[in-house]
Image (cartoon, rainbow, N blue to C red):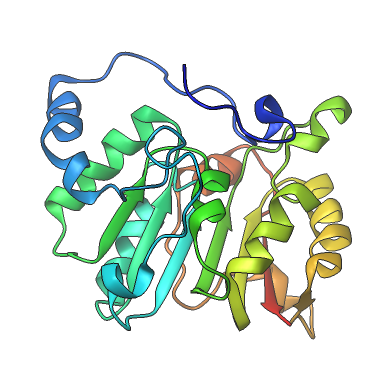
Amino acid sequence: MSKAHPSGAHWRNFYGRLKGKALKPSQERYIREDLDALALDGVDWQSNPDRTPLPVAEIFGDRPIWLEIGFGAGEHLVRQAEMNPDVTLIGCEPYLNGVAMCLGKIRRSSAANIRLHPGDARDLMDVLPPASIDKAFLLYPDPWPKARHHRRRFVTPEHLDPLARILKPGAEFRVATDIADYVRQAMEEIPKAGFDWTARQASDWRKPWSDWSPTRYEQKALREGRTPHYLTFLRR
């Protein structure tokens, strides 16, 4: 049995299911052949129960490090890696089917600057050193629409405080969501965690970033008539 998380082990996760429909044979092959080479060692509790910080300088050198929390199927993660070859992109995603789809995209991509954590982003944030991340993305996170589940949203102190700890001063934190109540909670909680909202006019949150890569979740939101919001914060 693995060592339990301290203080609320079973409520740390802000995601739902871990696996959906059966993986295709090609996706099983991606998991089997590619994941170990891209996964970060020392993140999970079984291999690092003392939560020893990762030696990021040894692993990544002096390259900037960007973090995507919940990369879905990897569209945005892979595209950012292609556009920014001098940056290391770390993607966290506990949903196995999404990890498999992302691995397929990485195979078809020219990007060689991606590392993955196929699990809870909080476990990774536990072992990242303070002020080690240059940019972070939270794109179309699980909205947990029922009020009793709002504590499982990422935009709560339980998740935002560790994120603030690992971000460098001045680091950018991007949030995209199509859920109005998620925007409300984000605007209430993120500044309290040590961030400043950068918007000066309505277009700053209505229009996507200049380097934005649409995701499957955004396309679904648009098909269903929901309005995306693009929020940009800077770590104080």
Please indicate whether residue 42 sits to the left or right of residue 178 in the image: left
Which residue corresponds to the image point at 16% horizontal and 34% vertical from the top-left? 30
Q: Quadrant of the C terminus?
A: bottom right
How many numbered discs?
0
| View extreme (front): residue | 50
Question: Where residue 83 appears, x then y in whole percent?
Answer: 29, 75
Front residue of this view, candidates 51 and 108:
51
Which residue corresponds to the image point at 58% horizontal and 68% vertical from the top-left? 166
Question: Where residue 99 appears, x then y in whole percent?
Answer: 33, 37
Which residue corresponds to the image point at 37% horizontal and 29% vertical from the top-left? 96
Front residue of this view, candidates 91 and 56:
56
Please indicate whether residue 109 sits to the left or right of residue 16 in the image: left
Would residue 80 be visible to someone looking at this image? no
Judge whether 35 appears above or below 51 on screen.
Answer: above
Front residue of this view, candidates 158 and 75:
158
Front residue of this view, candidates 174 and 206:
174
Question: Where residue 150 appears, x then y in whole percent?
Answer: 81, 35
Would residue 130 be visible to someone looking at this image? yes
Image-quadrant location for residue 35: top left
Please indicate whether residue 149 sits to the left or right of residue 90 in the image: right
Which residue corresponds to the image point at 86% horizontal and 54% vertical from the top-left? 184
Question: Where residue 82 appears, x then y in whole percent?
Answer: 25, 69
Judge whether 83 appears above or below 32 on screen.
Answer: below
